[in-house]
Image (cartoon, rainbow, N blue to C red):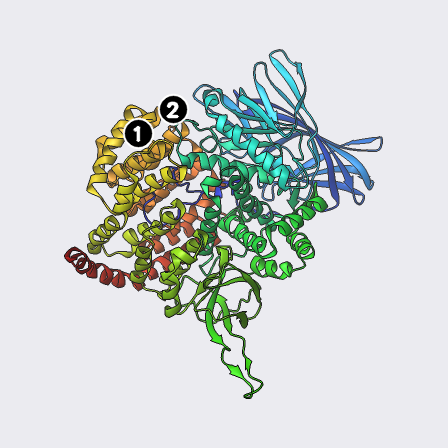
Amino acid sequence: MLRALAANSKGKCMKRVVVLALWGLFASSGILAQRLPDNVVPDSYNLKFEPDLSSATFTGDETIHVHLQKAATAIVLNAAEIEIKEAWIGSADFKQAAAVTTDEKNETVTVTVPTIVPAGPAEIHIRFTGILNDKLRGLYLSQTARRRYAVTQFEATDARRAFPSFDEPAYKAVFRITLVIDKGDTAISNGKIISDTPGPESGKHTLQFSDSPKMSTYLVAMMVGDFACITGGADGIPIRVCAVPEKKDLLSFALLSAENILKFYDSYYQTKYPFQKLDIIAFPDFSAGAMENTAAITYRETLLTIDDKNASVDAHQAVVGVLAHEMAHMWFGDLVTMKWWDDIWLNEGFATWMSFKPIEAWKPEWHAERNEIQQTGGSLSTDSIASVRAIRAKAETPAEIATLFDGIAYGKAASVLRMVEAYVGPEVFQKGANAYLEKHAYGNATAEDFWNQMAATSEKPVDQVMASFTQQSGAPLITVKTACAGGGSTGGFFKKKKIKETTKVTLSQERYFADAAKLGSGSQEIWQIPVSLRPAGSAETTYVLLAQRQQTFELPGCSPWVYANAGGRGYYRSDYDAATLAKMSAELETSFSPEERIHFLGDEWAMVRVGRLSLGDYLDTLEKMKGERTRALVGVMTGRFGEIHDTIAAPPDRPAFEKWVRDFLGPIAAELGATPAPGESDDRRGLRSDVFATLATYGRDPELLARSRALVEQYMRDPNSVEAALAGNALSVSALEGDAALYDKYVEHMKTAKTPEEYYNYFGALGQFPSAALAKRTFELILSPEVKNQDLFFGGLLTNVDTQAAAWELFKSNFPAIKEKAGESLSGGFATLAGVFCDAKLRDDAQDFFASQNLPGSERPLQNAKDEVNACIELRSLQQANLSGFLKKLPAKDAASVSH
Ligand SMILES: [Zn+2]
């Protein structure tokens, strides 16, 4: 699954794609679920559904072929919000009517028969009815202005809302699905349609789908309505990309991407694409980003349907990136599935790690390898608070399981895999990964299965490395000290021997905390860390395994510095003494790769956060990198400007910081020009729109603010006349000082938008208006029927420094309505919003508010949120005066440069 992105970054959001507030969209109600008893194992399900779209209900009929390990009179299955009409259990020639008891709290039903059923094969037959809900889970209702659709989203624990089932990932089975639907409608499922017959009633037809492979319940998919598809294929596998007919013209780029990605995966994986076909379907109401149902990937429209000719570079990259993630799941997740949800990272970490590879192969000019290092940096940042969970974490209830779909399962797990891949070498890693997939195909696996295989293939202690990074929370900080030894000579006059020169590298590890008081307080964790060392002036990397608190290693020759994250793929922070750091930053442009420079800046910022490096020195390092023109690097360099402007700088210092931003970025903006040149690279186009947004937002460049208003007017007249990303940024920038009249225009254009990108360009900008009255209108709009239940985005309003306090009051007073619209199931995810603040009063108020709501699964997110707010407050107290001092020195600098 691709989760919706969390909106807890500090500062204003400039991204056009609205920051999605909810990762917890899948959270289930607060139940102490128990695992099913393990005496019954399903082999196959015969499932027949008849949805009634007009009454929003469905009827179902199922036969489950099971195997009883021991004789029993009762069988327990998962079921929720389903009414059972009839049940019986058959074995051999004996069929018995069954009594059914329901345990709502545990989401189970128990089917009991009077006479004992012997061990061995048996079948359970159940007839049932259910509701097509509007809460985006189970079998639910989706709609356009024109008509209704029935669609599914089952991960993690919602298959039980569509049919009584053994709804745990280890109970893999074959699914034979039949759908009875209205004449004129069509349907899509995991298998191909193998028969289509009229009836049983008039006005209906019956579709039967081919048997699914052996798979987990959460991967079953069904969609009913009038989808429009475009078709293609790769390597003999037919591919269809589908959406509601209104969006049919927006599918071509997704199809082209899917074909390229499938070709790549067929060359990477030893097992070719394991299913008969691949369907990719977007529909209008969808909680997650996308979902990897076996051979039937489902999607939020905005991530799949784009106007290939006019969409932004970012929109194109999002389509390829998300498809690459979901298609990677066909192997990691669908073919081989984690045994239990505590190892969900085996799905999500792998799909996230893998998703960059087909992009690097197909679109090398996008430099996805740099985005990989950015992702590692983001994960290290998430991982820096004290209450963060370990990659592998216990989860039993649906609400606990839902909280595992977080930045740790996705980003951190991917980053650890990236480090291990670099350590054993990509070819060896590929071999090990394939051996693991072959061994567990159509089955389940645990973390140990993976790392034991990788250790055996690589003959390196990958098992110990991965266990230490998977089972301990947090990430290491490695302090690097180097000293030259040797040189000179020994021995007497006649036997003079030159002593070889070496560099002694002493590495010590401790857990990195963003909380300065905790860092250096003697944490207990010890990691097994593959550290990649590269001496000055060398292109060669030497791997050492840091397995103790402190170890010394020797490199040949005397080197003035040794960089301890060569290639930038290590999942750790590193720290050097000031003199070494100065030498290294002087050579950043010449001796470090772009990936290393990205990681280097991340390390520096980590030191700023804990006060080991002054913010002024950090900004000085940025000034040394003024010549950077690659998008990812400039993005990393300017990525902290929002945080500095909105949360670190004292309000009276903001104008001086804005001036510094103008001086820093102005020359780059001038060089890029206002509009794209013909034949310009995607990287440069993206860079222009990023620089424009940063310069206008944090530099408050008056010329750019005026230009952005002109771009907005032009975009409103003709959306195709302005580059889409530039337009999105212009909308946000203009909103910063926008009034009610401009707000009205945004709402009007949002409602008539022709593409999802255009819609979210307007929607995302609404949160940037500075007035509390307009913030109130945005709340009302989001809670009205005009905005879909999938789009409950409050992150922008809550991170906008101008409206934050007012927006928080609105959030609290509207929470009953928010909960009603979202459904009880996802409200636990809102607790992450308690982390957007940088203020003690708001922190305490948010903590009290969410705690008083007793939202299922909100405990850990709430603790994480508190740690994040505290880290932000501390960062401000450590660096505010320092920033002030840095800014005060600037005019003198300017005068000096003028006088020359
Ligand atoms: Zn996923």
Q: Is residue 485 left or right of residue 814?
A: right
Quadrant for ligand 1 reads top right
Amino acid type at image mark 1: Val
Q: Position of residue 140 (x, y in %)?
A: 53, 30
Q: Which residue is mark 2?
A: 754
Q: Nearer the viewer, residue 227 or 91?
A: 227
Query: Counting other residues with Cα less than 10 Å from the Cα at mark 2, is it few (<14), some (14-19), or many (20 or more)?
Result: some
Amino acid type at image mark 2: Lys
Q: Residue furthest top?
A: 202
Q: Quadrant of residue 212?
A: top right
Q: Is residue 20 left or right of residue 503?
A: left
Q: Is residue 626 left or right of residue 416?
A: left
Residue at (54, 88) in percent of width and height: 493
The disc, 2 or 1, on the residue closer to the chain's N-terminal end is: 1
Q: Which residue is mark 1?
A: 747
Query: Counting other residues with Cα less than 10 Å from the Cα at mark 1, is it few (<14), some (14-19), or many (20 or more)?
Result: some
Q: Nearer the viewer, residue 681 or 872?
A: 681
Residue 158 at least partly seen = no
Q: Residue furthest right?
A: 93
The numbered disc on residue 212 is none
In what quadrant of the picture does the C terminus appear?
bottom left
Q: Position of residue 580 (x, y in %)?
A: 40, 68
